[in-house]
Amino acid sequence: MNLADSTQAMNNLLGSEADSQRTLYPYVTGTSVVGIKYKDGILLAADMGGSYGSTLRYKTVERLKPVGKHSIIGASGEISDFQEIMRYLDELILYDNMWDDGNSLGPKEVHNYLTRMMYNRRNKFNPLWNSLVLGGVKNGQKYLGTVSMIGVHYEDNHVATGFGNHLARPILRDEWHENLTFEEGVKLLEKCMRVLLYRDRSAVNKLQIAKITEAGVTISQPYALKTSWDLSAFKNPTAGAEGSW
Amino acid sequence: MSSIGTGYDLSVTTFSPDGRVFQIEYAAKAVDNSGTVVAIRCKDGVVMGVEKLIASKMMLPGSNRRIHAVHRHSGMAVAGLAADGRQIVTRAKSEATNYESVYGEPIPVKELAERVASYVHLCTLYWWLRPFGCGVILGGYDRDGPQLYMIEPSGVSYRYFGAAIGKGRQAAKTEIEKLKLSDMTCRQGVIEVAKIIYGVHDEAKDKAFELELSWVCDESNRQHQKVPDDLLEEAKAAAKAALEEMDAD
């Protein structure tokens, strides 16, 4: 009798009764998103891949979306959770527009909203399994921030999710500077995305770059990066370690 | 029409011997005492205008909105008790977002009108609720084109080509009937609505008023929005000019 009671109590502590309703693992996932501030605004880059475990299952997943007039969001992690986040954001923006009072939500506000959402879900042991990048420009102020699935959030001049943190940010730390032009910014992002393409197994060679300035949002058409596999380091990869592959 | 329903008018759950529910009729009187609301359905959209009577010179122009967006594609103009109107608008917004989250497409205007009418009617069925003291004109644009509905405090809702509620509704309806709506674009419709409202405004009884105009049309990308400022000024100028012409006669 007592044992049954305590297990019931334990289950309730961990979440709602139907445990099958909690997020336990991600299924279709997107990989890194990289974002930088540049002279006129923010640039985000993400590929269009949705992996199903180790399979590169979907290759036209748009992981960069505009949010209202002043922001763009990039997501990595569970794609279905990203779609749910977009539904919440669309409703947020709709209600904001319906006020019709001359004000509109800026990137800082949207970032805060996302942080609250992610953190509160995490506290109920039912996280939205995403790492998000939120960038935008409002009234001349540039803003670039990130939120993780446990609610860790910060802003910086350059941010990335997932593998991007390990492979792209070191490049950005060396080569990012204030007042990059648009062309310099895109080249820098492409350099990061190329390294990710070489070294991240869940990257696909089809990416989009999103730009946001005071004037508005533009998300590029998908395109592929040029890769070079005849580098000598790739030619005989096991030269220094006979027997490995 | 002014019959006293002594004894049968204390509760909305009481019929009079001649089959009327007096409380609902009294609610309609609250609507009749408010500033005129005029709406027309042109060939490419819907235009709604409100004669917003200004109670005090202290009020900031542009405050006390009478036309509210209900969703991207539709808006509501309210006449009568403003607080009751706010409640109806909130309910309509919630019905619209709920429909979209369940069915994945914006709520058809007909469906929204039915839901709002149903809600208004609800409050005429219980003795512990009072009827809404406001009438609502709902204008929207969905895949069946632009549509205009009016919901009265009794909970009836009809679809219209042109509708008017409030003080000057009789005169406004006469003016609307003179218009050839099927040939009119919303650009022209805006000017006509402004003329009608300026025309029915009673200078003697009510001093100042503010004109609030909104539209949903092809030109606004089928989104409900306030009429752009330049067109609003054009409409006001044309309306004032038309008034002077009438006075000159």
Image: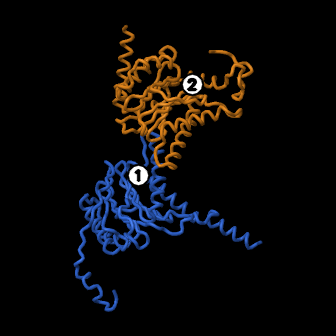
Chain colours: A blue, B orange
Q: Amino acid at mark 2?
A: Val
Q: Residue furthest front?
A: B144
Position of B118 compared to A60: left or right? right
Q: Is residue B179 visible to the viewer in this orientation of the structure?
A: yes
Is there CB contact under 8 Å for labels 1 and 2? no
Other residues around mark 2 within 10 Å, as few (<14) / some (14–19) / many (≥20)? many
Instruction: Name the spot of residue A124 as percent of width and height, x first.
Output: 58, 63
Instruction: Name the spot of residue B231 as percent of width and height, x first.
Output: 34, 29
Identified at 46% across, 46% down, the residue is: B105
Residue under numbered circle 2: B31
Image quadrant of residue B129? top right
The chain under label 2 reads B
Identified at 39% across, 32% down, the residue is: B45
- Let me know if marks 1 and 2 both belong to one chain: no
Instruction: Name the spot of residue A43 as percent of width and height, x first.
Output: 32, 59
Dividing the image into 4 quarters, which one contains the N terminus of chain A?
Answer: bottom right
Query: Could you say which disc has been placed on residue A194 in the image?
Result: none
Q: Amino acid at mark 1?
A: Val
| Vertical position of residue B238 compared to residue A189: above or below | above
Image quadrant of residue A198? bottom left
Q: Secondary structure at mark 1?
A: strand
The chain under label 1 reads A
Nearer the observer, A203 or A156: A203
Q: Secondary structure at mark 2?
A: helix
Instruction: Name the spot of residue B3 as percent of width and height, x first.
Output: 66, 15
In whole angstroms, how far apart are the C-alphas of marks 1 and 2? 40 Å
| Vertical position of residue A233 compared to residue A147: above or below | below
Dividing the image into 4 quarters, which one contains the C terminus of chain A?
Answer: bottom left
Residue under numbered circle 1: A67
| Vertical position of residue A159 compared to residue B202: above or below | below
Identified at 29% across, 64% down, the residue is: A177
